[in-house]
Image (cartoon, rainbow, N blue to C red):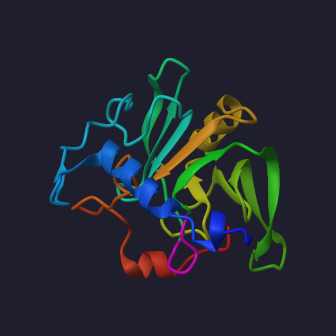
Amino acid sequence: MGRHQGPGGRPRRRGVARLARVAAVVGFVGVTGAVVAVPAMAQPNLVAGTPCTSTARACVDLVSQKAWLIDKTGKVIRGPLPVTSGGTGKETPVGTFRVQWKDKDHKSSESRLPNGQPAPMPWSVFFAEGGIAFHGGSLQRASSGCVHLADADAQAFYETLQLGDEVQVRAGGPTGAPSSTSARPSSSARSSASAE
C-alpha cells in the first residue's frame, strides 16, 4: 500500500476532510454546497497604534516605514520610529521571527565603503535568515534587506531586545496585507539599495 493510498488501494480523501474543517472555521457549507462566509474577527491583542500583536517585542511596518519596541505587557515603549528597509530585489522579509544574535560593532560581509573596508552595521540585532538585522544606518536610502534605524534608536533596540524575543515584520497590517496608502520611499530611493 502506497503512502498516499487507503485500504484497498483507493486514494485517501484527506483533502476533502481538511477542506471541511477549514470551511467549519471560516464559514459553513450548506446542503447545496454553497459557502456562507462569516465576517472576519478583529485581530486579537493588537498593540495600539501598530500592526503587531502583543507577543512582539519589536514591530516593523514596511508600508509606513515605522518601527516600535514593545514591552511584555503589550505597551509601546519606543516608537513609532522612522526606518528604511530593503530595496527592490532585496526586500525585507515579512513574517514573525526571533532575535537570533546581536553584535554591537558588526561589519557587513557584503557591503563595502568607498575605501574597500566592510561597511559598519552598528548595534546589530539579527532576526531573520540571510543576515537580516535591525541596525544603525541611513534613513535616506534603502538597505539590502535590513531595517535601518537612527543610531540612538538602533542602540535602544540592541539594549532592549534579548535572544529569542519575537520580531514581527508587517506590510501594512496584522496579516501582512498591503494597506491602501503607501509611505514607502520612492522607487528611485529604494532602488539605490545599500548593501547593509
- Span of residues in magenta: 87-92
Instruction: Identify the residue shown where x is 74% and y is 80%.
Output: 114
Say whether residue 100 is left or right of residue 79. Answer: right
Q: Nearer the viewer, residue 79 or 29?
A: 29
Residue 76 in the image: x percent, y percent?
44, 27
Total residue callouts: 0
Q: Position of residue 187 (x, y in %)?
A: 39, 79
Quarter in which the C terminus is drawn: bottom right
| Above or below, 13 relative to 134 | below
Dominant secondary structure of the residues highlighted in magenta in the image: loop
Q: Nearer the viewer, residue 86 or 137?
A: 86
User: Can the viewer see residue 17 in this picture?
Assistant: yes
Residue 162 x %, y %: 72, 32
- Quadrant in which the N terminus appears: bottom right
Which residue appears at 50% of the width and 63% of the height? 13
Q: Is residue 91 magenta?
A: yes
Rendering coords of residue 49 (x, y %): 32, 35
Q: Is residue 75 left or right of residue 31?
A: right
Residue visible at 76% across and 60% down in the picture: 120
Where residue 9 sits, quadrant-wise, is: bottom right
Q: Can residue 6 be seen by looking at this rendering?
A: no
Residue 32 magenta: no
Q: Residue furthest front?
A: 8
Horizontal side of 73 relative to 175 (left or right) equals right
Query: In this view of the protein, which residue sits in the foreground, 14 or 171?
Result: 14
- Quadrant hosting residue 143: bottom right
Q: Considering depth in this image, is 67 or 167 the residue closer to the camera?
A: 167
